[in-house]
Image (cartoon, helix red, strand yellow):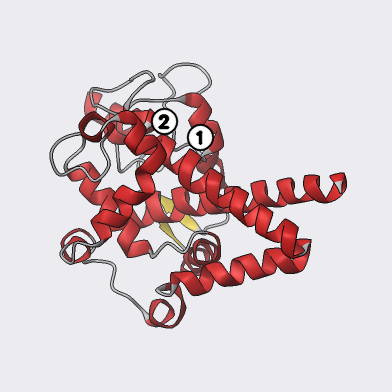
Amino acid sequence: MLASFLLALVVSALVTQIAVFSTTIYLHRSATHRALVLHPIVAWGFRLCLWITTSIVPREWVAVHRKHHAHTDEVGDPHSPRLAGFWKIQLGNVFYYARELRDPDLVPKYARDLKPDAWDRSLFDHGLLGLAIGISVLCLVLGIGWGLFAAGLHALMYVFVLSSSINGLCHHVGYRNFDNTATNVRLVAWLTGGEGLHNNHHGYPRSPKFSFRKGRRWEIDPGWWVVRVLSTMKLATPQKTIEEAVLSQDA
């Protein structure tokens, strides 16, 4: 019983981190901001991971996030705690995301460059199918009861804790290196592949690296470590980092 419980916890944490790194590297840094170009095979792998762990349709997520950058903490922001209130975003961010997707003009306006391909039409646009496959795999590995437990815990952590903390907590408390309304929360960054360094990101959205060498100590961006490995293997081509962008501005 205890061993099964611990195994389910470990598997759930692993699935959550797969979703987290697929989100930050592919969805956020690459697809949304073009901060890096991924090899097509790597990009496809991240799309597959997102499909079976989150059911997210990439161009929809990209559209919502680009709208957030276009109207950060002002009227039009899909999920601003300054407008809606902290707890509404921290606990209900997913509902604000779903509300945005009801707008038929959202994707054509903010993600018109992401045209659905054959993989989207056959697989990745069918989010519930991907989620069903992912849950089924967990149940095959862990058994039905523990598989459902692991899937539920993953959903709770990814949707209601980690993702919502980036849009809620990281626009509410924390410190700033740059003059914008987002904040850096290092604990959130450690758990979300670097996403908690949100003030840095809003300062330089095209940077593939969220940590800033001249920021406070212990700014850790695990997503950047993965990007560096992919870059060394010629599987990713990053744009300028924050430090490089700052140096070019100062030159």
Which image quarter holds the C terminus?
Answer: top left
**Residue at 37%, 62% in the rendered image:** 58
Residue under label 2, please give it. Answer: 197
Picture coordinates of residue 67, whole percent (x, y): 21, 49
Location of residue 178 with respect to 142 vertically, above or below:
above
Location of residue 212 with respect to 123 vertically, above or below:
above
Q: Are marks 2 and 1 in contact (CB under 8 Å)?
A: yes
**Residue at 24%, 55% in the rendered image:** 100
Mark nearer the viewer, 2 or 1: 2
N-term-proximal mark, 2 vs 1: 2
Picture coordinates of residue 1, whole percent (x, y): 86, 49
- Crowdedness of circle 1 by 10 Å Cα count: few (<14), some, many (20+)? many
* Amino acid carrying mark 1 in the image: Asp
* Amino acid carrying mark 2 in the image: Leu
Decide if residue 236 is in sight here: yes
Q: Secondary structure at mark 2?
A: loop
Kindly give the residue lying farthest to the left in the view shown: 75
Picture coordinates of residue 182, whole percent (x, y): 30, 29
Q: Is residue 118 left or right of residue 204?
A: right
**Residue at 46%, 69% in the rendered image:** 40
Q: Secondary structure at mark 1?
A: loop
- Crowdedness of circle 2 by 10 Å Cα count: few (<14), some, many (20+)? many
**Residue at 48%, 65% in the rendered image:** 47
Q: Is residue 245 left or right of residue 130?
A: left
Q: Is residue 205 left or right of residue 187?
A: left
Decide if residue 33 is in sight here: no
- Nearest the viewer among 105 and 219 is 105
- Nearest the viewer among 27 and 214 is 27
CA gap between label 2 and label 1 equals 8 Å
- Nearest the viewer among 81 and 41 is 81
Q: How many marks?
A: 2
Which label sits on residue 221? Answer: 1
